[in-house]
Amino acid sequence: MMMRERMDNNGLSGKLGPSSMNALVYDTYGTPEVLRLEEVAVPVPKGNEVLIEVYATSVNSWDWDLLRGKPFANRIGAFRQPRYRILGADVAGKVIAVGADVTRFKRGDEVFGDLSSCGWGGFAEYVCANENALTPKPAAISFAQAAAIPQAAVLALQGLRDKGDIKQGQRVLINGAGGGVGTFAIQYAKLHGAEVTAVDLAEKLEMLQALGADHVLDYSSEDFTTRGYKYDLILDVVGNRSTFALKRTLKKGGRYVMIGGTMLRIFQNLLLSPFVSRLEKKKMMLLIHKPNNGDQQVWKELVELGQVLPVIDQEYPLSEAAQAFRDIGEGRLKGKAVISIKN
């Protein structure tokens, strides 16, 4: 790879890195087979951006949806071709260059963050990111662990704290608890003194108990909406039950927070939730992800205190990232899939 001269924010030129890099790209919607490694230009940071040498990134269900162009909402404004040629929102790495207007970071800083609000691009050796999307990496954990945090952990936090208004002693159910969001949600709910029921595949139940879940259910053999138990709060990562079944599973005054699911389930909940809220005093809400540095900072502090840790099922090299997508699509990963780019 050719080295290039670049001006730093003090007006000093120097050899700051290669001019090209390896990246996982795709030009058409489809299965993981459309992904390929390609040599592309290293981006140059704008005024409020930093250039990150990516040590690790992680795969989220949003990456999976964007790859396939499903649901259709992901094609709005990008019907024929993907909006982002390089996927990857969660990154952890080192700052190697900064734009002229950057005030929060300097070269050499270790950072992690969610780039879904500023262009994606994490499945590459380098990426530019707005400084406000980033948080200093906890020193006590690896880059791989840091890359597992941003999107999944913030979704869990916003679902339980902001929408769910979680309180000590509440009975909380997490549907789809064995993935990234769910494993963070279990740990956060237990920190707040909740009684947690975790629902997922049988092969994940032992892991969910180890994370602190009080009760575990195999969704393939037992439907939590027909057991007769009622919950103060349901955090739903997969959205595989009807609104009618869910509302009878909530206590009066209870809250249902939907993070993921099919468009049919999402529309059903949006249509019926006002009536459920008014007639039965039960709130049914759809969480809209709002990536932000403040919520990442909450998780940084919890990790530094040793109160939570990311759960990583498997690490893959960038050259095998397509397999990580296949594993995500099958829904059998325990926690997160991480792409390790630099050791």
Image (tube, rainbow, N blue to C red):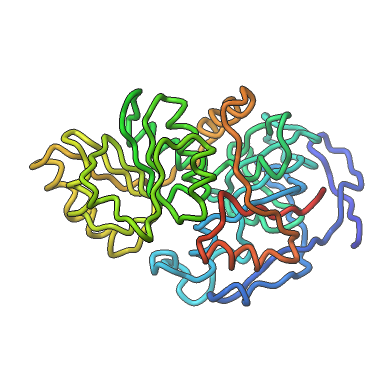
- The answer to which of 63 and 53 lies nearer the viewer is 63
Q: In terms of image quadrants, where is residue 290? A: top left
Q: Taking 113 as reference, is 275 left or right?
A: left
Identity of the residue furthest to the left in this view: 279
Classify 36 as above or below 104.
Answer: below
**Which residue lies at the image location 54% right of the left edge and 68% below the top edge?**
67
Rendering coords of residue 123 (x, y %): 68, 58
Rendering coords of residue 93 (x, y %): 74, 43
**Which residue lies at the image location 48% right of the left edge and 48% below the top edge?**
205
Q: Taking 209 as reference, is 174 left or right?
A: left
Can you say which quadrant of the picture contains the N terminus? bottom right
Rendering coords of residue 145 (x, y %): 67, 41
How many dots with numbers?
0
Rendering coords of residue 240 (x, y %): 33, 59
Classify 123 as above or below 187.
Answer: below
Q: Taking 283 as reference, is 239 left or right?
A: right
Classify 82 as above or below 180.
Answer: below
Classify 35 as above or below 43.
Answer: below
**Which residue lies at the image location 20% right of the left edge and 45% below the top edge?**
228
**Which residue lies at the image location 70% right of the left edge and 45% below the top edge?**
144
- The answer to which of 243 and 294 lies nearer the viewer is 243
